[in-house]
Structures are given as structure tokens and as C-alpha cells.
Image: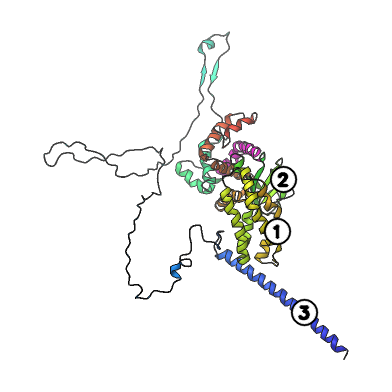
Amino acid sequence: MTNVPKREDQNERLIRMLEQQLAQSNRQIEALTEQVRQLTKALYGSKSEKSKYQAPDGQGSLFDDDPSFNESEHTEEQSTATITYTVNRKLHKKKRNDSLHEGIEIEEVHHHPTNTQCDCCLGQMTEAGTTIAREEAKFIPAKMMRIQHIEHAYECKHCKMDAAQKAQMKRGKAPQAAIQRSIAGPTVLAKLIYDKFIQYLPLYRQVKEWERYGLLTNDKNLSNWVIRAAEDWLLPVYEQMKQTLTAKSVLHVDETYAQIINRSDGKSGQSNAYNWVFRSVPSQGPIIVLFQSALSRSRSVLEDFTAGFQGTVICDGYSAYGNLPDVTFANCWAHVRRYWLKADSKNGKIGVDYCDQLYDLERQFKHFSPGKRRKARQKHSKPIVEKFLKWVDESPFFGKNALAKAAEYTLNRVHGLKAFLFDGRIEIDNNPAENAIRPNVIGRKNWLFSVSEAGAKANAICLSLAETAKANGIDFYQYLVTLMTELPNLPIHQQPEILNNYMPWSKK
């Protein structure tokens, strides 16, 4: 009889253990189910981050919110009344979706009758008026020219005849070439770089186009031209822009992967390299966008670029962003919203709604000065942030599902998420950096990889000038022509202050 209670205790412990194992298995099944749902959505679902919980502004449901669809169907007798009404439509002039700039040169083509003799009296007819029948665009293809720089020498015949006088000679001096002993002139280099970094046309696909224009070359030559031009003339401009950028107090930072075939660290060409982007904020002067090529995503890259920088870095939640001297970090609310949007549940909707409230306020504060924006955020945004963080902290989110990950991501970055409340210069998210890095992503899909680290560095320099020029409303092609023509003939290394006249935001 004494063995019975012991056996019962063993059975109860066994039952509890099995119940715990079952509960754990159920949690694992739920987590795996959630993971499968997320992967299926990522593969087949919409990629938009617009909230599925709200209709777009000014656009409601076609059926759910219309009261006429909630009423019972009218019978034939009830529908016999006839209602007449008049609709006054406002005529809108159709807007063309194609046009030409105002300054385009006009060529007139006049069309006269083949016979201007009157069919009635056989007299000569006089012109009564004209009508523009149509306008069309005419494209004049580019052409290649061979430019020969010829230096002329002059001598003094009078001094030459006098044995007591020193012979006097003068020679015209041709301007320095952008690349010595190369056929590539400033306009060729400008178009080469423009087509690659604005039109995203890889060098190997440009070879046939250059051949059509009359320049016989190959992609290796084109690559060398880009590297030489970037190292000799674009790099000094890049370094000057970098000094201006790191002197500011707020920066956007982001990074994306790249591929370099011949790496100096001994790793395979299949290993990921990275392109980092650094962008200034509008409230601190002209927009500057700089790219930095690196073999890794480590904190040392950020430390090297931001050496001497003191201020705030706006970034995502990557662990490399942190523990830098004289640098504080502000985290991105767009990433937070993205996590709650993925949760796809009632609580996920609540999290997204909190984020949307903050973004609604930011749209109202968009044109405020930094000081006025900080006060407005303290008054209106801060209570929403505090309420949201308290709700996340007190909610029982646990496990490995999307909801728990959203809560964990939010609570681990509380300090960085509050940073925008105390400084009006800080943006609420890191979207400007993500938008700035998009051209690099588009280009990567076209030129695929860089063969060498020198090529990757040249790509980063050219992209930096291209995106900064676009941000400041500068024609990148004409800007490159100016740089390649004038900088080789200026003492920019002895007098670097000259480069201030060649910044994309300079009046020149």
C-alpha cells in the first residue's frame, strides 16, 4: 500500500512534464506557423508598407461604408417614382504628358501649295495666313570629333640676326589633359560617368555605343578612365565635401551590401562587401550625400569616416551603431512601424496606429524651424511616444512570433527612439538615407560587381558627386565637364580653398 502514493506522485509528475512538453511544442508550432506565414507573405504578398488597417486619405471602401448597400432591397412598387436631375460637368483641358523645354531651339518647316495660281481667273494668289499644323520633336544624334591641340612657336627675327642678343622664343601652351597620354577628353569622361551612374549603364554595354559614335575602345579602357578621373580630379572634391559634412552635427547613416572580386583581405569574391551612405539634413545647409566603399560592415568603418564628428547619427537598429565617442544615436521610427506592420494582428494594428499618429504630426511640423518643431513635438508627440512605450512594456508579448519581435525591437531602442523629441533638427526616421542609397542598389543590379577595390572606391566617389549634384539641382553632366576641364589647370593641391568654388552648391 505504501507504493501506491509514490506511484501516483510519479504519474502526476509525468503528466505535468508531458503537459509542459505539449505546451512548448504548441508554442514552437505557433512560431513555425507564423514564420511560414511571414515567408509566404514576403514571397507573394504586397511589398508596400502602407497600412492595411487604414484606407488611403480621401478614399474609402466602395461598398462597406456606403449606407445604400446596408438597406434592404427596394420592391418594384417602391421603385416606381421617377427622379430627374441635371449634372453640370466642368470641362477640363486635357494635359499633355509630353512636352519640350521652353529654351529648345525652334526650326520652322514651311509648306506652300504646289500651285498658287487661281483655278478660276488664273491670276496669282497672295498669302492669306498661316497655321501651325503640328509640332514634333527632332533628335540630332551626338557626334565624335577629333580635337588636336596644336602649340604654335614664335621667334623674334630682329634679335635672331643680332649675335649680341639672346634669341627670343615664345610658345603657346595647351591646357593640361584630364588623363595624360589618353584620348579621353573632358566630355567623353563626363558622358562615360554620367551614363554609368545616372543611367545605370554598365561599361561593357557602353562599348558598342561608343563604337557607333566613332570611338573604338573596350570595357577595360573605360574602367581605367573612370578610376583615373575619380582618383585625380573627383577625389579632391569628395574630400572637401566630406570635411563640410563631418563639420555638421546631424547625419543620416545607412549601408547596403556590394561585391568586390579581388579583395585585399584574402576573402572570396563571393563574400559581401558594403557601401555606406552618409547624408546631411536640410536644416543644416545644402544637402550632401557621400558613399564609402568598405570590405566589412564593422563599427571601424563608421569610426574611420566620422573621425572628428560630434553630434547625432540617425540610423536603424544595427549593432555597429553605438559606443562612439562624442556621438549620440537616434533610431528610426519607420523600422519600428515596419516590425508592427509585420505582426498582422489586433495588437499589431495598435502598434502601427501609434506610429501613424506620430507621422501625421510630423507632416504638420514639416516646414517648422528646428526650434518650433522641437516645441511642437514636446507638446504633441511626446505624450503619444510615452503612451506607446508604456503599452508595449506592460503587454504580455513573449515567444518568437512577429509580435514579440516587434515589442523586443521597440523596447531595446527606447532611448534612440525618443531622441527626435529633444532636437528639431533630427528627423523621425532614416528614410532620407534609405532613399539616398537606392541608386547604389539600382546600379548594383546592372553592373553586378566591382573587379577591384580601386574600382569600388571610384564608384563610391562618382555616386557621391552624382547624388549630391542631383540634390542641389545641378546638371551632373555639365558639372563633370567643368571639373574635368578646369581642375587639371588649377593648383588645387597647393591651394585647396579653390575647391570651394567647385562644390555642387557653389554659386559658380
Q: How is the image coloured?
A: rainbow
Question: Dot 3: few (<14), some (14–19), or many (≥20) neighbours within 10 Å?
Answer: few
Q: Is residue 243 magenta?
A: yes
Name the residue: 67% across, 58% down: 387
Q: Secondary structure at mark 3?
A: helix
Left or right, 6 with respect to 245, comes to right
The alpha-carbon separation of the residues under discs 1 and 2 comes to 21 Å
Q: Quadrant of residue 495?
A: top right
Count of marks overlaid on the render:
3
Q: In the image, which disc is placed on residue 411?
A: 1
- Queried whether the magenta region covers residue 214, the answer comes back as no
Q: Which dot marks residue 16? A: 3
Q: Which residue occupies 80% across, 81% down?
A: 13
Can you identify the residue that label 2 sits on?
A: 327
For marks 1 and 3 on the same chain, the one whose residue lies earlier in the sequence: 3
Magenta residues (range): 222-245
